[in-house]
Amino acid sequence: MKQTQLLKTSLINPNPNNPRIVKDYKYKALVKSIKEFPDMLNLRPIVVNKDMVVLGGNMRLRACKEAGLKEVPVIIADQLTEKEQREFTIKDNQGSGEWDWDMIANDWDIAELEDWDLKIPNMNVEDEIITSEYMNNKDLGDMLNNYNNATIKQIVLYYDLEEFEYVLRKLDEIGKENKLDDNSTVIRYLVDEYFIKQK
């Protein structure tokens, strides 16, 4: 087990390829909690590689700097291979924050991510159909036509659990208040209301 040591925040480099972010009120809450209880960092130190690049704790490092900390507890994981470092970055980040799906799509190997148990959402039905290796061109064409010509389309939204529960509660409240039957109707109602207000 590697020992934790205190290092100056100025010596630690954020990981530019970290695809996990903490935004808005959650980030502000993280900064606040670090200010109020900095000793919690001893329980979850920032993990860096031998070049002092963060493997685990990118957003914590940023929040520590914003909170005014000059030193933070760090574990230097200098024994990890490049692949193990990338795997650690994904696995360490699965518990909190949000994935930057643009970065995931452009900078990471999807097969590796799936091996590391990161659940990749189906971003595009057409992509999913086109990459099906077991289908012939006629089947692909038929499926794409069926999807494109369908009278019902689907929009998929991604939230962490806390935001998901909040959004569902609010959609339910809006639906009851306006006598709307389902969430699809509520979303349409909100879009219409937005454009009415813009006029």
Image: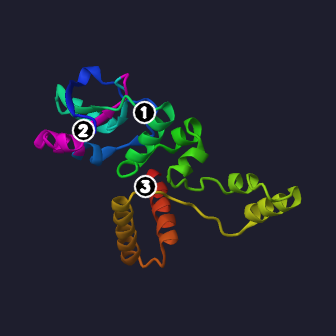
Which of discs 1 and 3 lies nearer the camera? The answer is: 1
Q: How is the image coloured?
A: rainbow
Estimate the x, y position of residue 76 in percent, counting from the top left: 31, 30
Q: Can you say which quadrant of the picture contains the N terminus?
A: top left
Instruction: Classify mark 3: helix, strand or loop.
Output: helix
Residue beneath the point at 48% across and 65% down: 187
Q: Which of pointers 1 and 3 lies earlier in the amino acid sequence?
A: 1
Q: According to the image, label 3 marks what residue?
A: 197
Q: Is residue 134 left or right of residue 20?
A: right
Q: According to the image, label 1 marks what residue?
A: 80
Q: Which of pointers 2 and 3 lies earlier in the amino acid sequence?
A: 2
Alpha carbon of mark 2 to alpha carbon of mark 1: how far?
17 Å
Estimate the x, y position of residue 73 in percent, counting from the top left: 20, 33
Q: Which of pointers 2 and 1 lies earlier in the amino acid sequence?
A: 2
Residue 43 lies, with reference to residue 168, above or below; the image says above
Residue beneath the point at 46% across and 77% down: 180
Estimate the x, y position of residue 168 in percent, counting from the top left: 39, 68
Few, some or many C-alpha atoms within 10 Å of disc 1 (few <14, some 14-19, many ≥20)? some
- What amino acid is found at the position of numbered circle 1 in the picture? Leu
**Magenta-drawn stretch contains 43:** yes
Residue range corresponding to the magenta coloring: 30-51
Estimate the x, y position of residue 150 in percent, counting from the top left: 73, 67
Q: According to the image, label 2 marks what residue?
A: 45
Count of marks placed on residues: 3
- What amino acid is found at the position of numbered circle 3 in the picture? Lys
Residue beneath the point at 73% across and 63% down: 147
Alpha carbon of mark 1 to alpha carbon of mark 3: how far?
55 Å
Instruction: Classify mark 1: helix, strand or loop.
Output: loop
Residue 147 lies, with reference to residue 92, above or below; the image says below
